[in-house]
Amino acid sequence: MHILWLSHFVPYPPKGGVLQRSFNLLREISKGNKIYLVAFNQKALLPNAQDIDRALAALKKYCCKITVIPLPADKSKWSKNTLIFKSLFTKKPYTVNWNCSVEMKNAVGKVYKEFKPDVIHYDTIGMAEYLQRNIPGVLNHHNVESRMLLRRAQKEKNYLKKLYFYQEAKKIERYEKKVCKLFQSNLVVSDEEKSILKKIVPGAKIDIVPNGVDISYFVPPDEEPDNETLIFAGAMNWYPNKDAMLFFADEIWPLLKTKRPTIKMIVVGQSPPKKLLNLHKKDPHFIVTGYVNDVRSYLNKASIYVCPIRDGGGTRLKILDALSSGKPTVATSIAVEGIRITPGENVVIANTPKEFEKEILYLIDNPEKRKQLSTEGRYLTETLYEWSHIGSHLNDLYNSLQN
């Protein structure tokens, strides 16, 4: 089968949620199929030619051909802000305008004629602008965009930003209603996301292809970690991660330090905010690493994974990475949305600072409970979230669209 994969980023290296999902799905469906990847390059992810070359070299193992298009918003430092301003006065939302490109449109048309795809995979709703109606199309939703922005608007304290996010959420919802029903399948990551999208677009065909984890890459360590060391891993240029760590630093960390002065926290992820860096300078037990090439060495040092996420959408691959690594995990209800966890058995739920304090200190003092969570968390990922099973399901779905 010939599959044309249209993406809003070059899906490599697989560091971080959406990159991990796209890379692993693409890798799995390349088994027995021919993949032609047409992708925008985002300079925030691959800033120079050497980075692009390394990514393309890795992806050529799975794609028969690759075309990379510069993202229009990356043309100058003013392009993105100008586009945000212009989008205030357009019917289409910013996330769609951001993916509009004459060069991409021409490239898709050319590849379509030459490659003759059997199925076209559109990796985000913004790529729906390039819909080829006479070929089965699959629209991937890393999360339900309108719902995610609505949640952000509800939490935003700045009135102007709140108004902007509400406006964008409504625009995206109207766009979802318009385009989702045009695709033979809309891929969502969980039952919850399916229910949300179904309410927005009742007539749309929706299939669940969950997020997963590479269980051979994220494995429990042989060595015993420090039982007073905590960790969170996630890029801080993604607002739910930044909000989570500022919430932790402001409201949870002081409680923990009062009860357990020797406790340590490792925060891994690019673009940490100044407030976290300043806390690191004042408190050597609060460790901020910035970007790291391999998070596993830091995961192995920690006895507990902490995920106080209060915003966003989809399912968090960072939770699956932690569980696959055998890390006892304390997380908010939002952080584990869409993952088939059993509270208290494979993940501990905490939503308030006091709850985080209580659960973390309990786990520090109870190695047997940590061991149980570690074993059950790993088992969950092995049985439900291994990428090869998920990729096989997606491949079956592609095949069904040709019948």
Image (cartoon, helix red, strand yellow):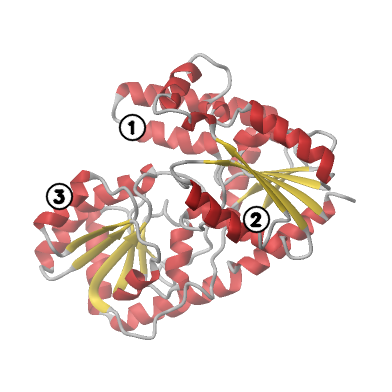
Residue annotated with mark 2: 209
Quarter of the picture containing the N terminus is bottom right
Q: Please tell me which of labels 1 and 3 falls first in the chain.
A: 1
Q: Position of residue 194 (x, y in %)?
A: 62, 46
The reply to whether residue 203 is in sight is: no
Location of mark 1 (residue): 156
* Crowd rating for badge 2 (residues with CA inside 10 Å; few <14, some 14–19, many 20+): many
Dot 2 and dot 3 residues touching (CB under 8 Å)? no
Residues under numbered marks 2 and 1 in contact, where contact means CB atoms less than 8 Å apart = no
Q: What's the distance in space between the residues labelled 2 and 1, CA to CA?
A: 31 Å
| Residue under the point 51% across and 58% down | 14
The quarter holding residue 355 reads: bottom left
Name the residue: 49% across, 54% down: 17
Q: Which quarter of the figure has residue 113?
A: top right
Badge 1, how many Cα within 10 Å: few under 14, some, many 20+? Answer: some
285 left or right of 309? Answer: left
Alpha-carbon span between mark 1 and mark 3: 24 Å
Neighbours of disc 3 within 10 Å: few (<14), some (14-19), many (20+): few
Q: Which residue is mark 3?
A: 278
Q: Is 316 situated left or right of 290 in this image?
A: right
Question: Three-letter amino acid code at disc 2?
Answer: Val
Among the two numbered marks 2 and 1 on one chain, the one whose residue lies closer to the N terminus: 1
Q: Quadrant of residue 370?
A: bottom left
Query: What residue is drawn where x is 19% and y is 46%?
Result: 275
Comparing 263 with 96, the one in front is: 96
Depth check: give the residue in front, 191 or 160: 160
In screen coordinates, is 164 left or right of 201? left
Give the amino acid type for the residue marked by disc 3 in the picture: Asn
User: In the depicted view, which residue is nearer to us: 49 or 157?
Assistant: 49
Whole-percent x and y of residue 78? 40, 24
